[in-house]
Image: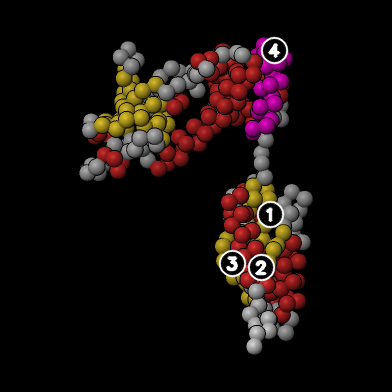
């Protein structure tokens, strides 16, 4: 297991003013002891005065054990192994930027660790052979891996065994190939004019006609007058734009015939949990529709 433990970056220690992700291990009156996740879990400390800009009434409300935090490095004493950190000097923009970088680094680390396990080559040797050089050449090894999906010859610069190269390419393909995102919009469509149901059908068909092979649009009835409109897309913004366009088409067709369209929930990405909740709701409504009171004859 020691062969699979390694820092994510070439530098053994971070530099002052670097943003880092830490895991809180122990909270005491003078501050919090943490592990720097990107630097092989070396220890650092957030002093009490660096936890918050506001007056601290309870340290446990500001920081908790086993939670990750984004902090900035104040001082590094490599000889003594001291790393002083600050949470209060980190802005929301810093947090977003640091988390994005960390997620990229974690993906790279996971791919190389799996390669290390399968080839029995220590993880740090893989970083020394090509990992840290990819950081230098492309700004981040993650960006290099994304490029390798299209241009495998990026790795030709390095003298890698065929086994290592094949396993690496397999891992990169499996983990970084873009996955389709599910998107959904919830709408209510009504029309009490003479065209009635025909106007609603025409609007929904016009929306489905916007489907493409990459982004097929499907519309399901939840319960009158509520419908859900769904699609999948490799690009979240493009998928949202497609559903918004479809909503506008429905609105145009239905309102021309005296109907009305109400966007209950705007287009957004949904998870498997959202899908399960929708399926459960539709099943419940279907059962309720089947339970019609007064159908059975009363016994005398």
Q: Secondary structure at mark 1?
A: strand
Q: Which residues are magenta?
A: 158-176
Label 3 secondary element: strand
Dot 4 or dot 2, earlier in sequence: 4
Identify the residue at image location x=44%, y=27%: 37
Residue that numbered label 4 is attached to: 161
Work out whether 156 lies above or below 235. Answer: above
Crowd around label 3: few <14 · some 14–19 · many ≥20 (10 Å): some
Kindly identify which residue carries mark 1.
Answer: 231
Disc 2 is placed on an element classified as helix
Earlier along the polypeptide chain: callout 3 or callout 2?
3
Tell me what residue is drawn at x 36 percent, y 23 percent: 43
Residue 184 vs 101, above or below: the answer is: below
Whether residue 67 is visible: yes
Residue underneath mark 2: 286
Q: Position of residue 296 (x, y in %)?
A: 68, 81
For residue 74, which quarter of the picture? top left
Label 4 Cα neighbours within 10 Å, binned few <14 / some 14-19 / many ≥20: few
Pick whichever of labels 2 and 1 is earlier in the sequence. 1
Q: Is residue 1 magenta?
A: no
Position of 202 relative to 84 (above/below): below
Query: At 33% across and 23% down in the image, what residue appears?
Result: 83
The front one of 278 and 197 is 278
Q: Position of residue 131 (x, y in %)?
A: 57, 19
Q: Residue at x 75, y 56 (%)?
A: 211
Pick whichever of labels 1 and 4 is earlier in the sequence: 4
Which residue is more in the foreground, 137 or 281? 281
């Amino acid at each position: 297991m020691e062969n699979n433990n390694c820092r994510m970056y070439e530098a053994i220690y971070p530099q002052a003013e670097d943003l880092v992700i830490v895991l809180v291990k122990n909270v005491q009156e003078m501050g919090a002891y943490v592990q720097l996740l990107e630097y092989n879990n070396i220890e650092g400390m957030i002093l009490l005065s660096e936890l918050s800009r506001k007056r601290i009434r309870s340290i446990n409300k500001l920081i908790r054990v086993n939670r990750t935090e984004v902090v900035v490095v104040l001082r590094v004493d490599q000889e003594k192994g001291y790393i002083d950190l600050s949470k209060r000097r980190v802005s929301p923009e810093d947090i977003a930027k640091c988390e994005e970088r960390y997620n990229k680094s974690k993906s790279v680390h996971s791919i190389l660790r799996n390669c290390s396990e399968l080839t029995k080559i220590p993880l740090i040797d893989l970083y020394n052979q090509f990992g840290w050089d990819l950081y230098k050449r492309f700004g981040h090894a993650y960006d290099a891996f994304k490029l390798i999906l299209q241009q495998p010859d990026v790795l030709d610069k390095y003298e890698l065994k065929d086994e290592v190269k094949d396993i690496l390419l397999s891992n990169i393909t499996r983990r970084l190939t873009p996955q389709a995102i599910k998107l959904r919009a919830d709408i209510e469509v009504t029309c009490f004019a003479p065209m009635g149901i025909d106007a609603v059908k025409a609007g929904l068909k016009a929306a489905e006609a916007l489907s493409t092979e990459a982004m097929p649009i499907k519309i399901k009835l939840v319960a009158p007058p509520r419908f859900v409109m769904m699609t999948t897309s490799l690009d979240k913004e493009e998928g949202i734009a497609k559903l918004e366009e479809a909503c506008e088409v429905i609105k145009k067709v239905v309102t021309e015939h005296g109907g009305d369209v109400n966007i209950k929930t705007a287009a957004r990405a949904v998870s498997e949990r959202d899908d399960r909740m929708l399926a459960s709701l539709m099943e419940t409504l279907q059962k309720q529709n089947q339970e019609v009171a007064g159908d059975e004859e009363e016994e005398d």
